[in-house]
Image (spheres, rainbow, N blue to C red):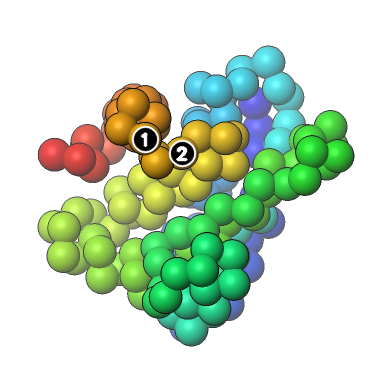
Amino acid sequence: MIVTVDLHNASNGCLIPLRKHFKLWATATMTMLAPEHKQQQLCIRIVDEEESAALNHQYRHKTGATNILSFPVPAQLLAANVLGDLAICAAVVEREAAAQHKKLDAHWAHLTIHGVLHLNGFDHEEAKDAARMEELEIKILAELGYNDPYQ
């Protein structure tokens, strides 16, 4: 399984992971979920707080910037091996990592994995779904050498 990542940095954050890191995190997630697939495509846009807030308002009807938004592809593109798009707000990621006393790269990895799971239909609206999603996140992060983000 290889995930091709199209990375766009539209933020003024300077601590953005390299494309190869996003590719590693997305590939690890997809390998766990769908090892039979050979190739997937993913677009990641790193945004500032203003763009994150606008997207959050437009698509989720919520106020303010958020760490990550996931946009799955329409059904007709699934056959083209396109996963979808992630919008990650660099400023929110950096703030959260500091507030939660997490290594910044570990938080980027966690959020990327979280977003890829959302693109694959996972959500955390119900407690049992949240538990399943967290279990997968912990397992994938551990395989990559990261600590449990929920500890």
Give neighbour class at mark 1: few <14, some 14-19, many 20+ (Cα, 10 Å): few
Task: Report x, y in % for residue 59.
Answer: 59, 65
Q: Position of residue 31 (x, y in %)?
A: 56, 24
Q: Position of residue 82 (x, y in %)?
A: 75, 42
Label 1: which secondary element: loop
Quarter of the figure with the N terminus: top right
**Can residue 41 be seen here?**
no
* Residue in front for this viewpoint, 49 or 55: 55
Residue 23 relative to residue 4: left or right:
left
Say few, some or many: other residues with alpha carbon within 10 Å of mark 2 (under 14 / 14 to 19 / 20 or more): some
In this view, the residue in front, 132 or 146, is 132
- Which residue is tagged 2? 123
Q: Is residue 149 above or below residue 138?
A: below
Residue 22 locus on image (x, y percent): 52, 49
Q: Eyeballing the image, is 38 above or below 84?
A: above
* Quarter of the rendering occupied by the C terminus: top left
Whether residue 121 sits left or right of residue 6 in the image: it is left
Separation of marks 1 and 2 at Cα, in angstroms: 8 Å
The answer, for residue 81, to whether it is visible in the render is: yes
At label 1, which amino acid type do we have?
Answer: Glu
Query: Residue at (52%, 63%) from the top-left corner?
Result: 60
On screen, residue 143 above or below 49: above
Where residue 130 sits, quadrant-wise, is top left
Q: In the rendered image, which quarter is residue 102 located in?
A: bottom left
Label drawn at residue 126: 1
Disc 1 + disc 2, Cβ < 8 Å: yes
